[in-house]
Image (cartoon, rainbow, N blue to C red):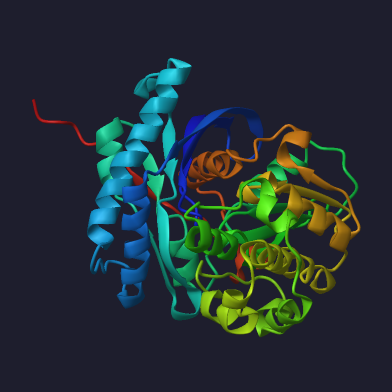
Amino acid sequence: MRAIGLMSGTSMDGIDAALIETDGETVSWLGSGLTLPYDAATRALLEGAMADARGVNARDDRPGRLAEAESRITTLHGEAVRALMETLRLTPSDIDVVGFHGQTVIHRPDARLTVQIGLGQALADDLSIPVVADFRAADVAVGGQGAPLVPVFHQALVRALELPAPVAVLNIGGVANVTVLEKDADPIACDTGPGNALIDDFMAERTGRPYDESGRAAAAGRVDEEPVKAVLAHPFFTAPPPKSLDRNEFKAFVAERLNLSGLSTEDGAATLTAVTARTIAALVPLLPRAPQSWIVAGGGARNPTLLTMLEAILGRPVRPAEAVGWSADALEAHAFGFLAVRSLRGLPLTFPTTTGIAAPLTGGVRFSPRLREM
């Protein structure tokens, strides 16, 4: 089947759209992708919606700016799909399904609550293409973590590689998550901690720029070691997988322990980058075997300072996704195209070793386009 996957991650920098051909078990082709960046007004709207989401107690609650943000991102996701189809000279009839992750605004699996805003029916109607959305709800409803969702996709990709096992596929977005794969065993996966979120928020506050481009500020700074150790004392980092996080889970905790106001921009960036690297490495002792190969995707793969720190701490090669023929930017979008096809086929998306559920479980909600009145 030919699918377009869509991803708007916790970094809230834009929408990734990517084409994939798959049967939901194997990947025939990783097609082209593109990114539709959010403008400043949309980012501000999403940040406001994230703040308003603290008042959400049920999946359908849309207090404050959430309803406006939901409508806005649905429109923009439609634009991203059309832009990708135009570049590839495709029409809606060429696409079997669109995988629409939406924008996570709150993720509290302990309360069996996860909300990814985005109007699946409206997107299907707009595009005249079937849409699969709301991928996490079924897992969280039965007590699962609801994240990460992409391990079964990583497993399909890694089967085609010849790398020393176990292989760890690390995605560093706003939150970092990892999939650990060995032979045909079910993937082990979890969120590892703050990925780019803390660094991005710090750089936006200090410089007005949304991230530390190429890790330049961190490379020029010095890591303040003691507060990094204090952050690592949080019980999340010694809890075994599976486990997952909300984007802002550590914002207050880290602010209390790092005293960023007392650090220069460069030292603050270096210290937060070290937090990301060391919280990823903290997972290794909790695994059955230490990964021998690491593949990194997401925005963090564009930060050589972070990758250098990771390689030094892990003592293993750390490869960006492009080094194995994948796209670091489009990988999660490809994943949601893959997951949409699995959902259509009723195949499991989550597993006991990835989200903590009792048995493998499918998920996602299908929306068929409605005929437009003439």
51 displayed left or right of 15 = left
Horizontal side of residue 166 vs 64, given as left or right: right
Name the residue nearer the viewer: 114 or 339: 114
The answer to whether any part of residue 170 appears in the image is yes
In this figure, what is the number of numbered marks? 0
Residue 298 position, x and y percent, is 62, 47
Image quadrant for the C terminus? top left
Q: Is residue 331 left or right of residue 54?
A: right
Q: Residue furthest top?
A: 89
| Residue at horizontal 63 percent and vertical 83 percent from the top | 257
Image location (x, y in percent) of residue 293:
85, 50
Where on the picture, by quarter, is residue 228?
bottom right
In the rendered image, the vertical position of residue 218 relative to residue 133, given as above or below? below
Residue at point 65%, 62% (across, down): 269
Q: Where is residue 355 in the image (x, y as percent from the top left)?
A: 60, 67
- Please report the residue visible at 23 percent of the width from the left and 59 percent of the height from the top: 67
- Give the image quarter of residue 190: bottom right
Residue that protrudes farthest toward the left in the picture: 374
Q: Can residue 351 be seen?
A: no
Q: Does residue 168 sit above or below 163 in this rendering? A: below
